[in-house]
Amino acid sequence: MEKKKQKISPLPIKKSVLKTLTPNDFGAVLEDIRDKFTVMVEGLEGLRGEFYAFRNDMNGFRDEMYNFRNETKSSFNSVFDYLSRIDDDLKEIKEEISRLNKDKAEQEYAKSIEGRVQKIQFELLAIRNELSKKKV
């Protein structure tokens, strides 16, 4: 079963009550409406003031964030430059170590050749001594 929808009047005041209202009553109702409207306007003014205060706070916060961003960017650039210099120094050290290793390898190679030459000289000396003993 369908229920009938009831209409709700915007003002729940019965017509019989309206007929019994005097002009003073209307004045009182209008004054009450005006007072409530005034309170509402004052509340909106307060809200507007709060909004402006909030907006000013947000502007200050925005400025602080810009400053923070710029300081952070500057600090990052300084750290990046510092690390780049360290990286360059490390590359130079690696090149120097590589050069020293090559020199060391060359020195070891030279010592190896010198040892072989000495061994050959010793063997030649031994052969010469053997030959000289046989000739005599």
Image (cartoon, grey):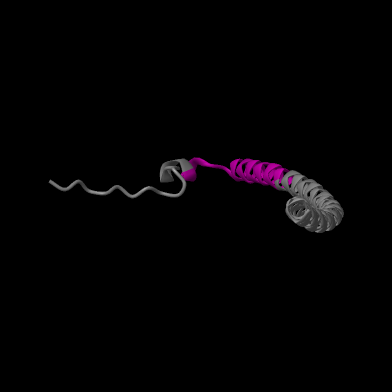
Q: Nearer the viewer, residue 11 or 71?
A: 71
For the stretch drawn in magenta, what is the main secondary structure? helix
Q: Which of 91 and 98 is in front in this view?
A: 98
Indicate the position of residue 134 as horizontal and vertical percent values: 73, 53
Magenta run includes residue 24: yes
**Residue at the far front in the pictured view:** 136
Q: Is residue 8 visible?
A: yes
Q: Residue at x 60, y 41 (%)?
A: 25
**Residue at the far left in the pictured view:** 1
Q: Using residue 123 as the reference point, say whether residue 24 is left or right of it.
A: left
Magenta run includes residue 11: no
Q: Give the range drawn in magenta.
A: 18-43
Q: Using residue 104 as the reference point, say whether residue 2 is left or right of it.
A: left
Number of labelled discs? 0
Indicate the position of residue 27 as horizontal and vertical percent values: 64, 45
Q: Which of 97 and 40 is in front in this view?
A: 97
Indicate the position of residue 49 as horizontal and vertical percent values: 78, 47
Q: Nearer the viewer, residue 47 or 127?
A: 127
Indicate the position of residue 29 as horizontal and vertical percent values: 60, 42
Q: Can residue 101 be seen in this view?
A: no
